[in-house]
Amino acid sequence: MQTVLIVGATGNIGASAIHAALRSKLHVLAIVRNQASAEKLFGNVGTREGITTVEADIMSDRGVKDVVEKVRKGELPAFQHVYAAAGGLFDTTSILDLTTEELRKHMRVNFEPNLFAYQATIPYLLEQNDPTSTWTLCTGASGDNGGRAAASMTQGALYSMANVACLDNADTNVRFNEIYLGLFVMAGAAADQFGVMKASEFAIAYEKILARPDIKGCRIMVCQREDLTELRFRKKLE
């Protein structure tokens, strides 16, 4: 059985990725901050079956690297896929009032963990040379709508990171894609309470990406529920 390594696993988007992996008959290796975070994860997805958790600090450039080292040593299951959805900081400070520290905090939370995850895992996936490997980055539409200054700028950085990764992996065994999310997603009963898309519903997009080897180097747009019925995607660099 193949395994998906999920970075940002305890959030709403991470829960979606877990749903998708399990429904695709894949094992999940989820990075969590601590045991309390692991329990939150299990609560979000409603099961412990098929999920291995490992504690690491994804904010550190060593965090995911240490997880990969444990995989290499056989202490954790080997993985063939990576899903990164780290972030979630969306302060409302205007661009004129934004301090240098606030901007750097948003970059540390919303951008750097995804970059660190990429740097730590891509060499491993290339070494394994599994032709079915995938690397999926979830970004948000705030980078285009400009509604929250610091968060918008971090999403812009992630868009650029996805461009670079698509180019770098165009001729490799790794199928890199970006999921561009333009909807609010929540796990569990909160979705019904606030009238937003359920994590288990958004999972359909990742399920389809995993099942579609023709989707590589693309941005997959999920901005309305209909986008889950018929995937809307385009090449990132065309």
Image (tube, grey):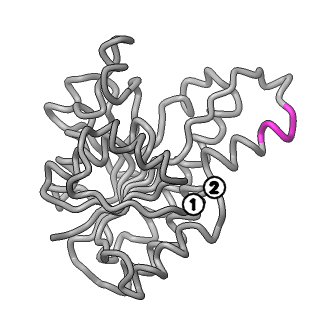
Amino acid type, mark 2: Glu
Residue nearer the viewer, 111 or 230: 111
- Residue 94, given in percent of the width and then of the height, sits at 77, 21
Write down the quadrant of residue 185 in the picture.
Answer: top left
Work out whether 71 lies above or below 167.
below
The question of residue 100 being in magenta is answered with: yes
Give the vertical position of 175 relative to 90 (above or below). below
Could you tell me which residue is drawn at 49 percent across and 46 percent down? 36
Tell me the SS state at disc 2. helix
> At 46% across and 76% down in the image, what residue appears?
68
Figure quadrant of residue 226: top left
Q: Tag 1: residue type?
A: Leu
Q: Quadrant of residue 190?
A: top left
Residue in the picture at 39% in, 71% down: 169
Residue 154 at what x, y percent from top left?
Answer: 63, 42
Q: According to the image, label 1 marks what residue?
A: 115
Please say if the residues under marks 2 and 1 sit with CB atoms less than 8 Å apart: yes
Disc 2 designates what residue?
112
Task: Kindly identify the residue that appears in the image at 45 percent across and 72 percent down.
Answer: 121
Viewer-nearest residue: 20 or 75: 75
Give the Cα distance between marks 2 and 1: 5 Å
Q: Is residue 44 within the magenta segment?
A: no
In the image: residue 227, left or right of residue 30: left
Taking depth in this image into account, of 229 and 15 the one nearest to the observer is 15
Q: Is residue 237 visible?
A: no
Q: Residue 214: give x, y in percent of width and height.
A: 18, 59
Asked which secondary structure carries label 1, the reply is helix
Numbered range of the magenta stretch: 99-103
- Which SS does the magenta portion mostly show? helix
